[in-house]
Amino acid sequence: MMIWTVVLPDLAATVRLARALAPLARARDVIALMGDLGSGKTAFARAFINARLGPTEAPSPTFNLVLTYEPEDETAPTIWHFDLYRLEEPEEALELGLEDAFAEGLSLIEWPERLRGLLPARALRLTFSHAEPGRRVAIAAAGDWADRLAPLAKTELWT
């Protein structure tokens, strides 16, 4: 597993990170977004969705628990955006279509800790934290995610 830390001094830096990661994501990928309330998870998810689909209204799925986004390109995967903050039991996520998302879609999951053992080992894990000024994100990449991210580690984005 490879781990990188990226400083995000402002929202624009969060958007740049999402735009850098979005084209690297594929069908069946799971991106776990961890961190405290207000740490940047939803801002990252919105920017990621917009980077994949173009300008799209991407509200937080806090009350719905999951929102899906169909790309115009039929060969591209459906994006499943989960916000599991209100999830009480991991099994409830199965009722939301979690297995379908993991099998065919591209999943962004806020509060993945609520899944306990259901989060795939292959998931890219982004842990957001408050750091003055702005935020910091630790990126933990297993499997082929490490290979996909290696070229980015050599850019100014990672400094």
Image: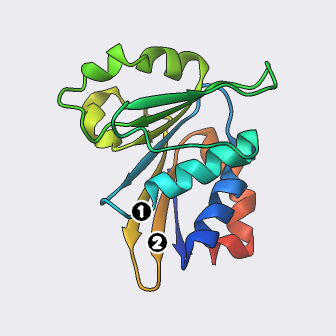
Query: Looking at the rendering, in which quadrant would you find the C terminus?
Result: bottom right
Is 127 left, or right, of 2 in this rendering?
A: left
Whole-percent x, y for residue 35 in the image = 34, 58
Q: CA distance from mark 1 to mark 2?
A: 6 Å
Which residue is drawn at the image coordinates 52% and 57% (left, top)? 43
- Nearest to the observer: residue 26 or residue 16: 16
Which residue is drawn at the image coordinates 57% and 70% (left, top)? 11
Is 105 left, or right, of 125 in this rendering?
A: right
Residue of label 2: 136
Which residue is drawn at the image coordinates 67% and 25% (left, top)? 70
Q: Amino acid at mark 1?
A: Phe
Query: Sequence-wise, which precedes: disc 1 or disc 2?
Result: 1
Residue of label 1: 128
Whole-percent x, y for residue 150 in the image = 69, 57
Instruction: Give the answer, above or below, for where 18 lies relative to 121.
Output: below
Instruction: Give the answer, above or below, for where 148 lies relative to 118.
Output: below
Count numbered badges in the picture: 2
Q: In which image quadrant can residue 144 be found?
A: top right
Task: Check the image and name the residue furthest to the left.
Answer: 88
Question: Could you tell me which secondary element the residue under label 2 belongs to?
Answer: strand
Work out whether residue 123 can be spotted: yes
Whole-percent x, y for residue 33 in the image = 43, 49
Neighbourhood count class around disc 2 (C-alpha, 10 Å): few under 14, some 14–19, many 20 upward: many
* Discs 1, 2 touching: Cβ within 8 Å: yes
- Nearest to the observer: residue 23 or residue 92: 92
Q: Amino acid at mark 2?
A: Arg
Question: Could you tell me which secondary element the residue under label 1 belongs to?
Answer: strand
